[in-house]
Image: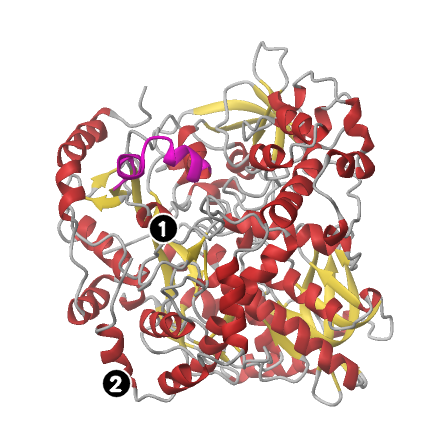
Amino acid sequence: MNGKDEKFITIYIMGKKHMVPANLTIMKAMEYAGHQFRRGAGCRGGFCGACSTIYRTKGSYKLQVALACQKIVEDGMIVTQIPFSPADKKRYDIDRLKPEANTFLEYYPEISRCLACNTCTKACPQDIMVMDYVQAALRGDVKEAARLSFDCIGCGLCAVRCPAEIVPYNIGQLARRLYSKHVVGPASHVLNRVKEVNEGKFDEEINKLKNMPKEELQNLYNSRDIKV
Amino acid sequence: MSGYPDYMQESIRLVEKTRSERLEKGYPLMSAEEKSEILKKWHPDYKEGTKRLLKIGPSAGQLMPHEVADILEAHPIINPKDIDLTDISFDLDILIIGAGGAGLSAALLAHESGIDPDRILMVQKLRLGDANSKMSQGGIQAADGTDDSPTRHFLDIMGGGRFTNKPELVEVLVKEGPDVIKWHESLGVMYDKNPDGTMKLEAGGGTSRRRMHSCKDYTGLEITRVLVDEFLNREIPYVEFTAAVELLMDDKGQVAGSVLFNMDSDEYLVAKAKSTILATGGFGRLHIQGYETTNHYGATADGLPLAYHVGAYLRDLDSTQFHPTGAAYPEQIVGQLATEMLRSRGAQPVNKFGQLFVHSLETRDAESSAIIRECYERNNGIITPTGMRGVWLDTPLIDLIHGSGTIEREFSAMYRMWGKFDIDIRREPMLVFPTLHYQNGGVEINTKCETSVPGLYAAGEVCGGVHGKNRLMGNSQLDLYVFGRRAGRFAAERAKKIEIGKLTLDHVYRYERWLSEAGIKTDRRAPLILPEYRGKRTLEHKIKIL
């Protein structure tokens, strides 16, 4: 951005009118307008869900959702952030749980209220099939619930919009841990290697490298076989 | 519709033309001599006028970027007279500063080491789990493959770090790597696996075996959210939107907790602790040399001034990691990460004529240097409408090699992010240029994560020594959990044994004295806590290559 031939547009941040450069993300536009984020900014790269935003565009009744760091401003846009969604995350001991529908119903019984209205899916800035994973959990398909929810960044917008007051991202989190721990289980070559390390199998080799003169180590490095 | 302007699309036609031939041929790795030469000429670390010798404190004389020296040669935020040390808000065994991968691991292990949860407190200036840890895309290294060994991992790290690493830290890292993966699996982290239940392992720049474990291109997100979930299950106390602004000491010369700043009420709080763990992350938001960064909003290197005020040694801050492939276009995501895993899976960097100019998996320092040279010496880069330069990262190769659907399945974050700007990375390459990524150096620690000041522990990116002058992909993720867990364990051990004496902030006066004795006159204050982007600052690009 060189600032010279910049096109400016009007946006409304929590109702207040601001002129901002047209090519900014909502996040940068808010900063341009003078906000210093305490809440509402995180990774700034679409991975953390701190900057959940809802907005309407000029002339539209539709309430839309976005991550402020990933969405470009539009002329006439009216925005506000929802940097937090109130949700009761249940405490559980993952070791003792079973990967089945009853586990979800025990901790989050409200999922049985799912109306299958798909509002959650429409509210997801990651385009995740939220309703589908909630339904998968409800029928005990832990694998499908884990797979479909995987790209969830926990922004909370689904929970804010759900008319049945379900907190989908908590369901997804539980599903993924259940699936990995109790359906897939650990990789045996990892367990074997841990055992070998604990038995001291590599101690002597590594000690040798640790105490090697730098030049010798360099030669060893430069001549190491690479199999990738 | 393509998100690229016409002139870029013309160049993309050339990239398409050479694709099958490039796939066949590849490009050779640099020799040790070639690498050393290109680093000296083109790596930003070697650019003149970008660093200075630190003037004050126990690590005076160390060379570091101006931006880092600026926050060390700066006044502490607090005036000790404003803090009532008898009004203690938190009386703790363990205080953990920072809630990313290292901090969360430390908290879980402190708890498992027998510390009552109510005697632990985690403080974080943003939200629980907000950290660079969460943004890591490509993967985490650990030598658990059947054709691999921790010894090989050790050699790769030492060579990657140009043999400047602290060997005993590297030893710990490689030996505990497989155990970290085992721990993650026991907590329910969903690693990518083959149909036979083995880990999907890939190569990274500078690895001699495939040892990169991944969770699609959301590796850090997946691990962090599992650790956060477990942390909440254990009911360990934490306070968000509360920053550490100055460590506390006692009259025996030990670190004894921290002065905290409540970012809602703008009040100071005193947290007294027997062991204090710094897990504050790195310095991307200092925008070293004006570079854009891949880093989290909170990456303002607060741990460096905090540790330095109490006299902790620093190391290796003269080297900075520039990730070879940050976005160079579109403007809105300039500097954001295009994961190295794209290259692991076959994407090649090519110039505007569609020619290869470097092997895809050189170590990051060398790969970055080659891209900068291609753009600025040979002038073979694409120049964007805002004057950025970049080369193509030819992502369609990935589906060509591994079958269609691979990009959508394995790189959904990348596909989604570029897709928002009408760039379909299955069909079109990404325009990339090196971006500020990682603080290689930092606070010096030993294998117990002890700093040079008793009572102060450190883990993760705030530390130096593990990666030497250049880190390999996937080793920072591993570092977080290996050293985070150790910090929690050893801090717990100490907390069971020691007593804190009379609290003091005399080191603040000492620091002011160091500043004035060195003739440093400045308005700067540190730690920064939040970066400043208000108004026109949000539009600034300051990077100057030549």
Is residue B457 highlighted in magenta?
no
Please give left or right for residue A161 compared with residue B235 in the image.
left
Q: Given the image, on which type of amino acid does mark 2 rest?
A: Glu
- Which secondary structure lies at badge 1? loop
Magenta range: B393-412
Q: Residue furthest right?
A: B87
Q: Is residue A84 visible?
A: no
Q: Quadrant of residue B243?
A: bottom right
Residue nearest the viewer, comparing B289 with B157: B157
Mark 1 closeness class: few <14, some 14–19, many ≥20 residues within 10 Å: many
Foreground: disc 1 or disc 2: 2
Q: Residue furthest front?
A: B196
Residue B409, given in percent of the width and then of the height, sits at: 43, 35
Q: Quadrant of residue B32?
A: bottom left
Q: Given the image, on which type of amino acid does mark 1 rest?
A: Glu
Residue shown at the point (17%, 39%) measured from the top left: B352
Is residue B394 highlighted in magenta?
yes
Q: Quadrant of residue B468?
A: bottom left
Residue shown at the point (59%, 54%) measured from the top left: B530
